[in-house]
Amino acid sequence: MSKLIDTSSRLPAVKSAVKLLAIGLLVMVAKFPFSKEYGMLENFYTTIFMLVAVLLINLIWFYKILLGANWARILLLISFVLAEVPYSILAFFEFQSSPTIAVLTLLGLTIDSYAIYLLFTKPASMWFKKDNQEIKS
């Protein structure tokens, strides 16, 4: 059985970053009703399934970041660079077809960017490098 982690040892920057990541995830979810491709009835169940899967995976990921798993922080940065940055470029083209989705995309990108910045500040980096007990894997 694994030990419970002492929450008082978590840095405020890490806690704030995870809260911001959760808000960014909610912004992503908020885009679905405005999207034409996910609004169709035949895609409804697929959309709900994918949404639940993405939410669960991200909640586990955020939990691992809170526990101090450095691999989760690095993986977050890699996924951000590979997925969100190119998608944000497309958001500028979405202003013509769906300004709401474009604004939500850019808002989510801004929130996630600041959260990642917080995770890679010097105090947060030092916290991730310290021995955070047995739950790093």
Image (spheres, rainbow, N blue to C red):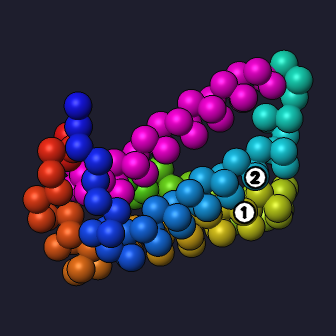
- According to the picture, the residue beneath numbered tag 2 turns out to be 30
In percent of width and height, residue 134 lies at 15, 44
Residue 39, relative to residue 82: is it above or below?
above
Q: Is residue 112 left or right of residue 25?
A: left
**Tag 1, which secondary structure?**
helix
Query: What amino acid type should be assigned to the residue bearing mark 1?
Result: Leu
Labelled disc at residue 23:
none
Residue occupying the point 74% across, 67% down = 103
Q: Position of residue 10 (x, y in %)?
A: 31, 68
Where is the N terminus found, in terms of image quarters?
Answer: top left
Question: Is the C-beta separation of discs 1 and 2 under 8 Å?
Answer: yes
**Residue 61 within the magenta-colored segment of the rendering:** yes
Q: Is residue 78 something one can see in this rendering?
A: no
Q: Residue furthest bottom?
A: 122
Mark nearer the N terminus (1 vs 2): 2
Closer to the camera, 18 or 90? 18
Q: What kind of secondary structure does the magenta stretch mostly adopt?
A: helix
Q: Which residues make up the magenta segment?
A: 43-71
Figure quadrant of residue 130? bottom left
Q: Residue at x 37, y 69 (%)?
A: 14
**Residue 99 is one of the magenta-drawn residues:** no
Disc 1 residue crowd, few under 14, some 14–19, many 20+, Cα 10 Å: some
Residue 87, percent from left and from top: 57, 55
Q: Is residue 44 above or below residue 131?
A: above
Which residue is depicted at the point 29% across and 60% down?
6
Q: Which mark is residue 104?
A: 1
Secondary structure of the residue carrying numbered label 2? helix
- Between marks 1 and 2 in the image, the one whose residue lies nearer the viewer: 2
x%, y% of residue 57?
Answer: 47, 37
